[in-house]
Amino acid sequence: MDQTTPQVAWKKGNAELLILSLVEARPRHGYEISKLIEQRSGGTVRFHVASLYPLLYRLERRGWLQGRWVEKSGQRRRRYYRLTRQGRRVLASQLRGWREFVVGINRITEAENA
């Protein structure tokens, strides 16, 4: 029997959506993305560096994100990721799919609890 918790399964299935959503407004570096996910989810969703950075690199290889190194005085060098035109299309599609899924789940659970 699979011992994966629902939170782990949902995170794996929606990690791309979370990351693309966070870089839609402006470029962000990996650590900032990780902290925003944790903060905005109230701590229920967290990404470890070991899983986040390979995902960012994969999204970059797909052409959904573009990364560039930025050096600021007194700080270490960071790679900032921004959404590409293709990434915006993918994000829009994933958001539509997510919203439809949530509506469907709500219909099922509300009907059972009515």
Image (spheres, rainbow, N blue to C red):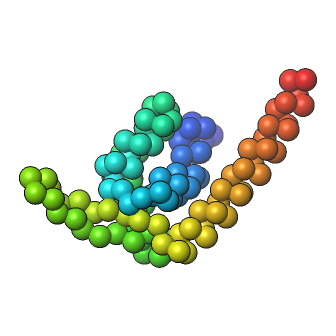
* Residue at 64% in and 63% down: 92
* Residue at 52% in and 51% down: 18
Indicate the quadrant containing the C terminus: top left, top right, bottom left or bottom right: top right
In the picture, measured across the screen, residue 70 lies left or right of residue 100, that is left
Q: Between residues 17 and 54, which one lies in front from this camera angle? A: 17
Is residue 52 shown to the viewer in this render?
Answer: yes
Q: Between residues 29 and 109, which one lies in front from this camera angle? A: 29
Q: Please state the horizontal and vertical placement of residue 20, each as a whole percent of the image.
A: 50, 59
**112 versus 93 height, above or below:** above
Indicate the quadrant containing the N terminus: top left, top right, bottom left or bottom right: top right
Is residue 59 shown to the viewer in this render?
Answer: no
Displayed quadrant of residue 7: top right
**105 versus 87 height, above or below:** above
Q: Please state the horizontal and vertical placement of residue 88, each as a whole percent of the image.
A: 56, 68
In the picture, measured across the screen, residue 56 lies left or right of residue 64, that is left
**7 versus 96 height, above or below:** above
Q: Please state the horizontal and vertical placement of residue 90, each as a whole percent of the image.
A: 60, 68
Q: Between residues 70 and 62, which one lies in front from this camera angle? A: 70
**31 versus 65 height, above or below:** above
Count of marks placed on residues = 0
* Residue at 53% in and 69% down: 87
